[in-house]
Amino acid sequence: MRNRVVTAAAIAAMTLTDMAPAHAMPLPQDKAERATLCSRAALVHASHGENADPTERDRRDGLLRSTIDATGYFDAVGLDEEAGFARLAESGEIQQIAYEGNWLTTLNACKQAYSLGAAEPVARLPTDPADRPAACGAVALVRAVGAAGGDAEAASQGVMRDPQSAYFQLFAVFRAGDQDKADAAMSRQIDWAVTTGSIDALTQQCLEAFPAAGRFVPAPLPADRGTAGAACAFNAGVFIGLGGAAGERAKRLEEKLRAIETTFAPALVDSNAKLIEQALTLGPPFDILAACEARFG
């Protein structure tokens, strides 16, 4: 009863070059830091307009120049234009902030601070309700990668460790009907999610769209041994698929469960959808793993 839920491929697909540089408010007080942050956010915004129509590309390029001028970037960092632009695009600095996912939020804060015009429009979830679970699953993946600093294994564990992210991942699979369909649906949303520059805002939209994610707290395992055993076997399969320390714990749990697997509730064993639906009622996967270890380990 092995289950992927979060695939290594989906995490690995979110490479550093695919992701937009990011920072969130508040803006730094230091003039050079603030000027660099704002100018870099404007640079990223301009780079994401490369495929836009000529008018929009020109507008974004103009905003970049206006941001550099308004913040006094070159004077603040003590560099001429050539060296200053090279510093903005410096790979090490880009790598440091690449996974946070909120660069548009920063740019809007900079526009407000320096009176650079109206805020840039923040991304919204898909209007079709059928697309929203996968979109929120993709947003959860981006958040996890950001929290893990780009480490794929840590990100895959982090998705399951964070209650909200875990809920969105499980719910995306539940609504899609099976793992492969969920993977495909989330993969289609990944590029959109990583280029919005407003992951925190999208996360809030997801919580508003699916309030249960904000109430995803541990619940007791079912009293019935067969029902609890099936739930724990499903949970173990999730973590074995993810690997890492939790995966090793799950392997030990799975060995214990083999001795009683004939008692598992048939209605659950034969329905992955019901197992996921049950998991959504039991709470965050890491809490379920600990409860299963206490009960069967």
Image: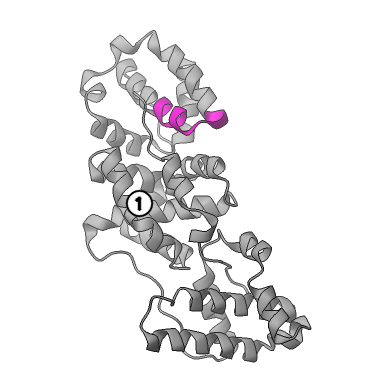
**Residue 6 position within the rendered picture, expressed as x and y whole percent measured from the top left:** 41, 40
Residue most extreme to the right: 78
Q: Is residue 75 above or below residue 136?
A: below
- Relative placement, left or right, of 83 versus 287 is right
| Amino acid type, residue under disc 1 in the picture | Ser
Does 45 lie within the magenta span? no
Between 89 and 259, which is closer to the camera in this rendering?
89
Q: Bounds of the magenta span?
A: 235-246
10 Å neighbourhood of mark 1: few (<14), some, or many (≥20)?
many
The correct choice, above or below, for 130 with respect to 155 in the image is below
* Identity of the residue drawn at 40% across and 85% down: 56
Asked whether residue 28 appears in the rendered view, the answer is: no
How many badges with numbers are in the image?
A: 1
Q: Most prominent secondary structure in the magenta stretch?
A: helix
Judge whether residue 95 can be spotted in this image. yes
Towards the viewer: 272 or 11: 11
178 versus 248 height, above or below? below
Tell me if residue 148 comes above or below residue 126 in the rendering: above
Taking the magenta stretch, the answer to whether it contains residue 242 is yes
- 70 relative position to 284: left or right: right
- Could you tell me which residue is drawn at 35 percent across and 83 percent down? 53
The residue at the point 48 percent across, 24 percent down is 250
Residue shown at 38% from the left, 70% from the top: 123
Q: Determine whether the residue tagged by mark 1 lies in a helix, strand or loop.
A: helix
Outermost front residue? 82
The x, y position of residue 231, in whole percent, is 35, 26
The answer to which of 34 and 45 lies nearer the viewer is: 45
What residue sits right under mark 1 in the picture?
187
